[in-house]
């Protein structure tokens, strides 16, 4: 019909232009004049021609005697950014995949991989940092008749071969891949493997996860991969920021002595709390970092570097609330808990120190034992006086009193610590501290899940004399179970060590 209208209004030349425009995908700049020698039928005068534009619709409208519509904003449903549809067609009828003729197999790029969309180089998006903790430790005394010296959190203390030791050597790569994804990867190059007494400095992946943000304000996010489990303030607090040399057994045994596991965790953190949690770390107040005001997650439950052993994942939830008073003082209170099934590894021992080598019943397999805890946390940040305390109760795997089987047993324990932060101005920060910890329960991640009590006083001082260097001296009075499985005739495993340990640590931040 449009061709006939063009003949009637502009002659056969205009009709030819119209056909050519439709077939070729572009409009003519102007309808050609009809030769004087050609006989033509009298027709109404054609409207003035209009110069062609990039869109063929204007020229076609002129040829048809229609009023050319001015450029308009993209209609609802039209491609974002005002992308027009194919020449000569209504852009409102085409999506962003079909807005031109370069789609489908004709295009080598999809909507995610766009031409020229490579973005920044890796060194413009990521940052490298880390820290190392060389130590020197020595058992100063041992009560007669007690077990050999043993600290579950520091394998360099054994009473027989002690000296210099590298507790941690961390290398961290992190950064924003985009507004909606961050990457965090951490390696430790000073790992001592379980059961290995003479070899050290193995490399182990400690963290490897992506934070997927659901909004640009980063209030809601999912953490996917290998990361810390949100249970316990001191578990989430980096060893780079913690004042005492090691975490307490009462809290650390909840997540297999290394705080991490494979899983998916949801974190909710309002913008004002994001800033407060960041300032508590950056300002030197020994914060735990941003693990959400509310956290909920599922994870394997067997711990770092251990494959899942059953079909029942662990579930964890945490709620915390940091608050800053008008005078600047910050306090934080938290509650957290988890539940799951844990499979205990086994090892040969002489049961009650008698008989042949045996592995206690109930180790291995694919079922496991009920593993549940709930904990409370209170932190009064050191401004300059500080107080920090946590306590948890629950039940979990533990070796029986007869040492012949593993069973589900009750547990409880926690710690309390006082400290004082003295900012000297010229010589850095000095933080003297005293901490008492107590735990009665099982060490589920160790062979046979040894069950016992651990009581310990820690008295020390951290001297952070430069941003990149700090020195900590700590003396510990210990009465705790030796968690080593001893397979030797007449040797009774899991007795308590009672004695004193002195340790010094020089921390390098880079």
Image (tube, rainbow, N blue to C red):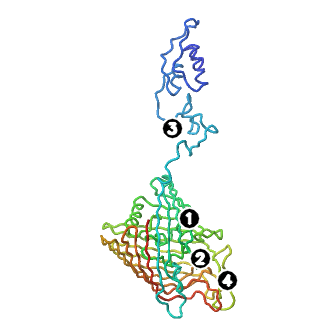
Q: Nearer the viewer, mark 3 or mark 1?
A: 1
- Residue beneath disc 1: 226
- C-alpha distance separating marks 1 and 2: 20 Å
Decide: is 237 above or below 26.
below
Sequence-earlier tag: 2 or 3: 3
Indicate which label's residue lies in the foreground, 2 or 3: 2
Could you classify mark 2 by the number of other residues whose Cα lies within 10 Å: few (under 14), some (14-19), or many (20 or more)?
A: few
Q: Mark 2 sits on what residue?
A: 194
Q: Which residue corresponds to mark 4?
A: 359
Mark 3 or mark 4, which is nearer the start of the sequence?
Answer: 3
Kindly give the residue lying farthest to the bottom in the view shown.
Answer: 144
Q: CA distance from mark 4 to mark 3?
A: 71 Å
For label 4, the SS is loop
Residue 388 pos. (x, y %): 41, 75
Q: Quadrant of the C terminus?
A: bottom left
Q: Which residue corresponds to the image point at 60% horizontal and 19% vertical from the top-left?
A: 3
Q: Residue at x 43, y 59 (%)?
A: 270
> Whole-percent x and y of residue 190?
53, 72
Whole-number angstrom distance, CA of label 3 to CA of label 1: 43 Å
């Amino acid at each position: 019909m449009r061709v006939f209208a063009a003949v009637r209004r502009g002659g056969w030349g205009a009709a030819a232009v119209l056909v050519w425009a439709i077939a070729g995908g572009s409009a003519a700049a102007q309808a050609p004049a009809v030769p004087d020698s050609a006989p033509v039928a009298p027709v109404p005068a054609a409207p003035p021609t209009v110069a062609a534009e990039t869109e063929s619709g204007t020229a076609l409208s002129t040829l048809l005697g229609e009023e050319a519509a001015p450029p308009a904003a993209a209609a609802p449903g039209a491609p974002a950014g005002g992308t027009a549809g194919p020449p000569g067609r209504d852009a409102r009828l085409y999506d962003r995949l079909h807005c031109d003729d370069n789609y489908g197999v004709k295009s080598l790029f999809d909507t995610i991989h766009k031409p020229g969309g490579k973005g920044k180089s890796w060194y413009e998006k990521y940052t490298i940092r880390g820290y190392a903790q060389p130590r020197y430790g020595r058992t100063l005394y041992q009560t007669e008749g007690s077990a050999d010296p043993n600290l579950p959190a520091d394998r360099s203390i054994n009473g027989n071969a002690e000296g210099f030791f590298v507790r941690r050597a961390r290398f961290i790569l992190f950064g924003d891949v985009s507004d909606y994804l961050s990457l965090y990867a951490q390696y430790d190059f000073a790992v001592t493997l379980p059961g290995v007494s003479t070899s050290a400095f193995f490399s182990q992946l400690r963290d490897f996860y992506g934070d997927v943000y659901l909004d640009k304000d980063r209030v809601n996010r999912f953490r996917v991969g290998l990361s810390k489990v949100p249970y316990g303030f001191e578990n989430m607090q980096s060893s780079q920021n913690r004042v005492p040399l090691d975490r307490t057994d009462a809290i650390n045994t909840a997540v297999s002595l290394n705080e991490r596991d494979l899983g998916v965790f949801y974190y909710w953190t309002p913008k004002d709390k994001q800033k407060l949690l960041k300032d508590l770390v950056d300002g030197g107040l020994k914060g735990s970092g941003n693990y959400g005001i509310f956290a909920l997650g599922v994870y394997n439950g067997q711990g770092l570097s251990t494959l899942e052993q059953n079909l029942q994942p662990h579930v964890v939830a945490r709620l915390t609330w940091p608050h800053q008073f008008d005078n600047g003082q910050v306090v934080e209170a938290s509650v957290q808990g988890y539940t799951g099934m844990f499979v205990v590894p086994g090892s040969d021992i002489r049961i009650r120190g008698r008989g042949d080598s045996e592995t206690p019943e109930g180790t291995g397999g694919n079922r496991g034992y009920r593993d549940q805890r709930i904990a409370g946390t209170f932190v009064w940040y050191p401004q300059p006086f500080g107080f920090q305390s946590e306590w948890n109760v629950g039940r979990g795997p533990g070796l029986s009193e007869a040492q012949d089987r593993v069973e589900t047993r009750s547990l409880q324990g926690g710690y309390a610590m006082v400290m004082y932060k003295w900012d000297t101005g010229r010589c850095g920060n000095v933080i003297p501290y005293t901490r008492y910890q107590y735990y009665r329960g099982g060490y589920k991640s160790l062979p046979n899940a040894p069950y016992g009590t651990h009581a310990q006083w820690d008295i020390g001082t951290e001297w952070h004399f430069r941003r990149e260097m700090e020195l900590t001296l700590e003396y510990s009075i210990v009465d705790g179970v030796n968690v080593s499985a001893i397979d030797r005739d007449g040797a009774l495993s899991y007795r308590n060590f009672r004695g004193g340990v002195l340790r010094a640590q020089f921390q390098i931040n880079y």
